[in-house]
Amino acid sequence: MTHFLKNGNTYRVASDEALDVRSVLPAGNYTIQKEPMTGALYLEHIGDFTAPGKIYGDCLKNTDRIINTFIDRPATTGVMLTGEKGSGKTLLSKNVCIELAKQGIPTLVINAPFYGDAFNSFIQSIEQPCVLMFDEFEKVYDREEQEQILTLLDGVFPTKKLFMLTCNDKWRVDSHMRNRPGRIYYMLDFKGLDTTFIREYCEDNLKNTQHIDKICSISSLFGEFNFDMLKALVEEMNRYNETPSDALAMLNAKPEFDSGTKYDVKLIYQGKEVIESLSPRVFDGNPLQPRGIGVEFDTDPDDDEVDYKHIVFTSDTLIKVDAAAGMFVFEDKDARVTLTKVQPKYFNYNAF
């Protein structure tokens, strides 16, 4: 049977198969599309997210917390996940959507810079609870466009929404979203993998587990050793039955590309710590770089004369690596240098 669908003053012919009216949007993933002629917005169903066989780290714990908070709060809840690609933020955001889909809550994936009254009205017309996922938010929305969606994040509308924003650089996100729990309730920073995560993953996936300690040591060479690196490293080692060093020589995972890693330098010369005249005091780069680490200092700073000495420490003089602390110790003749990774400064909430 043929039907006629009326929209304003227009009628469109539709078959029985085309008539599938729902009072509730089914659980699943959708993108927002725009009619080229009228500019009207509509939803297009896309494939469901899939979770890996096993999830490591804090992903499950954080998933439960985000979902529980969203369900408990009366209106909108904003969550921002920041960190480099492969750090785990996308896995967490997708896992939240997967678990909420089991409760009948759909996800709208925002992959274009929609904003304004028409967009706000369209989102609010979906009266049931749903997730809005903004992946790589600061790349999709420029500064001015970010300001345009603040009203939506403020939750002044009655419908219940969970806004999930992922970004690589939180400093490119509009400042009016930072320190504003009314807009962004949670903000999670994803840094490099810790040794507990690395060990657990390797114990499950690495064929030759005798290399786990070496992998943990190598991970400390990177400012942020991410899951993409770990997964590729284990895959390559399993495929060719080789050491971590051999695999990294081929992989696109090089500590020298990681320019943001800094180390405090401590030098002991002839049993005495050199402080005032030591240069550099902060080392930037890879402690195992082929050219070594050069330090310069005055051998007798109490003397009026300046007697500078230059010593180069190479990987051949490495005597200790503490991956958990990010520490490397080199010793050569009567000198010892210790490099300790400079950790980001975070506020100590336990001090109050």
Image (spheres, rainbow, N blue to C red):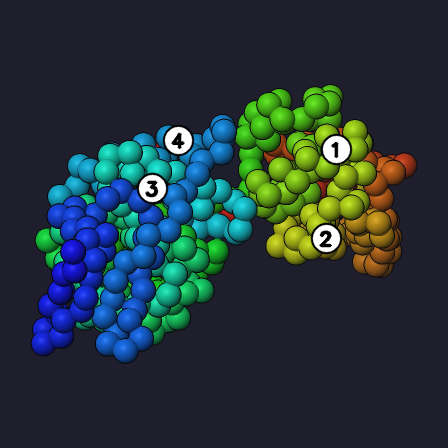
For label 4, the SS is helix
> Can you tell which of label 4 and label 1 is closer to the viewer?
1
> Can you tell which of label 4 and label 3 is closer to the viewer?
3
- Quadrant location of the C terminus in the rendered image: top left
Q: Residue furthest right?
A: 333
Mark toward the start of the polypeptide (1 vs 3): 3
Label 2: few (<14), some or many (≥20) within 10 Å?
some
Q: CA distance from mark 1 to mark 3?
A: 33 Å
Q: Which residue is mark 1?
A: 239
> Can you tell which of label 3 and label 2 is closer to the viewer?
3
Q: Which residue is mark 3?
A: 97
Q: Amino acid at mark 4?
A: Leu
For label 2, the SS is helix
> Can you tell which of label 2 and label 1 is closer to the viewer?
1
- Pick the front one: 62 or 118: 118
Q: Amino acid at mark 1?
A: Arg
Q: CA distance from mark 3 to mark 2?
A: 36 Å
Q: Residue drawn at (75%, 42%), measured in percent from left and top?
A: 248
Viewed as shown, does residue 96 lie left or right of 222? Answer: left
For label 1, the SS is helix
The image shows residue 175 at horizontal and vertical percentages of: 34, 64
Q: Residue drawn at (77%, 39%), measured in percent from left and top?
A: 247
Disc 3 + disc 2, Cβ < 8 Å: no
The image shows residue 271 at horizontal and vertical percentages of: 80, 34
Q: Which residue is mark 2?
A: 256
